[in-house]
Image (cartoon, rainbow, N blue to C red):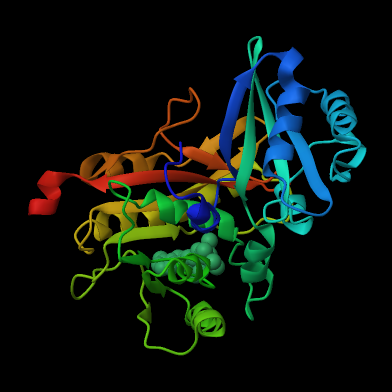
Amino acid sequence: MYEGEISNAQKLIEQLGGTIRIAEMIEEISIKELSQAIAEFLIKNHKEGKLNFGITSFCGFRDNRKVLNEVKKLLKGSISIRFANRNFQNLDAGTLHKEKLLSKGFEIMILKKGEKFTIFHTIAAQNIDKFSERDYKKPFRDMEVGMLPPKLALMMLNFTRENGILPKSIYDPFCGTGTVLIEGENLGLRALGSDISEKVLEMSRKNLEYFFGKKERKIFKQDARDAFKKELESEAICCEAYLGPIFKRSLNEKDLEKALSDTEDVIYGFLRNMHTKIKGDRAVIALPFWQTQKGEIFLKKVLEIIEKFWENRTVSLTNRPRKSLLFRRKEQKVGREIIILQKRSSVAQR
Ligand SMILES: C[S@@+](CC[C@H](N)C(=O)[O-])C[C@H]1O[C@@H](n2cnc3c(N)ncnc32)[C@H](O)[C@@H]1O
């Protein structure tokens, strides 16, 4: 539920990452009233010129064609109209921006719940182009290091919120080419990063400079397992941890064993080390998991260290016993398991 100024909705959606649309409810109606209610809304809210609109329906309602044709009939004669649905298919967020339906037109969403229908008017939509720009235009990318989608990085940054408020600074101890740092700076946070590889650190520095200009940044070489000399001025950790060696072929048992032991070693060391090294209490981490023919393989040993120093605050969306959120593209062998951790208070006081 979004409660706020309509004019701020687009700004908000661009800060959230995972939200596709924000829509304002118009009314709840029966199927018989559907087209009439949509036509009335459009007439009332249309200002001038040709009326551009589209319809997107969810939850088992698939009759866009019928509704669009009925609305067209109802509006015929009073306004010149054009609808944006191609072949009567639902609209995607990209089309809403391309067709300017948010500023100079309308998208009506229809939600079916039992026998009732609710209609909404979309006021904000995810802007894929802005993500693509931050992803593909950065001067340095490295397929070997991994390609954390900016959208996912942004969602993870939002999980560092406490009581709805973002931290002022975040630290990525596996910063690679800087995806989390870029999204962090874009949100106005101070972003600190380290990595074991000087090569990728330079990429991070150059990428940040490209988007946000030259300024002093704390981006330094550090093995995340090693002790830090002093506490870091960071209110939260947000990172995609080391995902293990890259395998170009299908994984066999031996590969999997190697991937598990390599990553457990680094991530275990990092979690043990890190709980005393940041000022804040929150950590949002993407861990690797592997998709095999036998199913998903998750890290096990890291749970011990989490249990000892951190509390898992992730709200799962499924009935899986692990409290985590999963992200994996179909073609990928390695997925990301997102966990949201809070320092145990007894540990924080030590
Ligand atoms: C999956 S990548 C992170 C990619 C990053 N999110 C990006 O945008 O490019 C993991 C990173 O962990 C680094 N790494 C591996 N072992 C490490 C360690 N022990 N300490 C610190 N960094 C390490 C690698 O150099 C690599 O850049």
Task: Indicate the position of residue 64 as horizontal and vertical percent values.
Answer: 82, 28
Asked whether, in this view, residue 71 is left or right of residue 229, the answer is right
Front-most of residues 98 and 279: 98
Name above or below for residue 305 compared with residue 187.
Answer: above
Q: Is residue 189 above or below residue 328?
A: below
Look at 54% across and 40% down and name the residue there: 326
Q: Does 161 sit above or below residue 203?
A: above
In the rendered image of this protein, does residue 202 appear above or below residue 108?
Answer: below
Residue 221 visible (yes or no): yes
Image quarter (top left, top right, bottom left or bottom right) of the C terminus? bottom left
Please provide percent x and percent y for residue 323: 40, 33
Residue drawn at (34%, 65%), measured in percent from left and top? 170
Q: Position of residue 305 (x, y in %)?
A: 28, 45
| Towards the viewer: 335 or 247 | 335
Q: Residue at the spot x=54%, y=51% of the render? A: 259
Q: Depth check: 44 or 348 in front?
A: 44
Residue drawn at x 46%, y 36% as measured from the top left: 1
